[in-house]
């Protein structure tokens, strides 16, 4: 059996587990949020219910890169970022080939954004040229423009009882991520 799990990357706490039921699930069984914006939206709402209206920023696996689902979570008080990957097709509302063409002759580390609106909620597609491809992310929170402030990094953690602060401006910023799969 497969499971969907949700965890806190900072605390290392697993706080939701759901069994993947598959196609043999009886249709008569009702599940909360089944009729909210599609299957991905319903699953994400069930998994993230304990975090509604907290204003938390959630990082999702590319399998959950569905803009409608991200907007549904934003309507419930969560900001979301998901990695964009082409599986068989590009996710709906992602101009994937246009993004690749845009970055074709750019230097590694070049960044750009595309701003959009869905149901009166802003969203952003981020892109960054990497040596072999373009890393793209879809977000409903955070900075909506690509400027020098995007490269400011500040991260604090504790290692062996010592509090460590990393702060500065870096040429290439890689996102810290936790996945919900």
Image (cartoon, grey):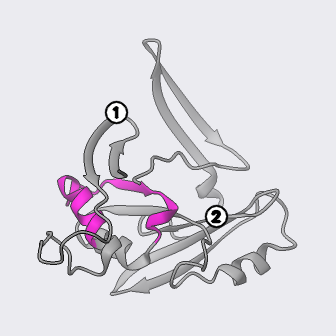
Image side of residue 13 versus residue 129, left or right? left
Q: Position of residue 167 (x, y in %)?
A: 58, 36
Q: What secondary structure is marked by label 1?
A: loop
- Which residue is under mark 1? 11
**Front one among 114 and 133:** 133
Question: How far apart are the two marked residues, 1 and 2, measured between alpha carbons?
Answer: 31 Å
**Front one among 13 and 128:** 13
Residue 30's label in the rendered image is: none
Q: Earlier in the sequence, mark 1 or mark 2?
A: 1
Mark 1 closeness class: few <14, some 14–19, many ≥20 residues within 10 Å: few
Q: What secondary structure is marked by label 2?
A: loop
Which segment is the magenta one? 42-65
Quadrant the C terminus occupies: bottom left
91 within the magenta span: no
Q: Position of residue 137 (x, y in %)?
A: 56, 65
- Which residue is under mark 2? 147
The residue depicted at 31 percent of the width and 53 percent of the height is 56
């Amino acid at each position: 059996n497969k499971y969907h799990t949700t965890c806190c990357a900072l605390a290392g706490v697993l706080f939701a587990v759901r069994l993947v039921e598959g196609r043999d699930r009886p249709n008569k069984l009702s599940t909360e949020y089944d009729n909210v914006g599609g299957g991905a939206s319903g699953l994400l709402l069930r998994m993230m219910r304990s975090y509604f209206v907290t204003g938390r920023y959630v990082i999702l696996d590319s399998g959950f890169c569905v803009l409608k689902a991200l907007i549904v979570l934003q309507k419930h008080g969560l900001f979301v970022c998901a990695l964009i990957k082409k599986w068989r097709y590009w996710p709906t509302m992602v101009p994937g080939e246009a993004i690749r063409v845009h970055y074709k002759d750019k230097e590694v580390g070049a960044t750009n954004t595309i701003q959009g609106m869905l149901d009166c909620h802003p969203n952003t597609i981020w892109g960054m040229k990497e040596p072999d491809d373009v890393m793209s992310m879809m977000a409903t929170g955070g900075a909506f423009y690509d400027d020098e402030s995007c490269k400011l990094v500040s991260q604090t953690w504790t290692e062996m009882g010592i509090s460590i602060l990393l702060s500065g401006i870096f040429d290439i910023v890689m996102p810290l991520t936790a996945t919900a799969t």
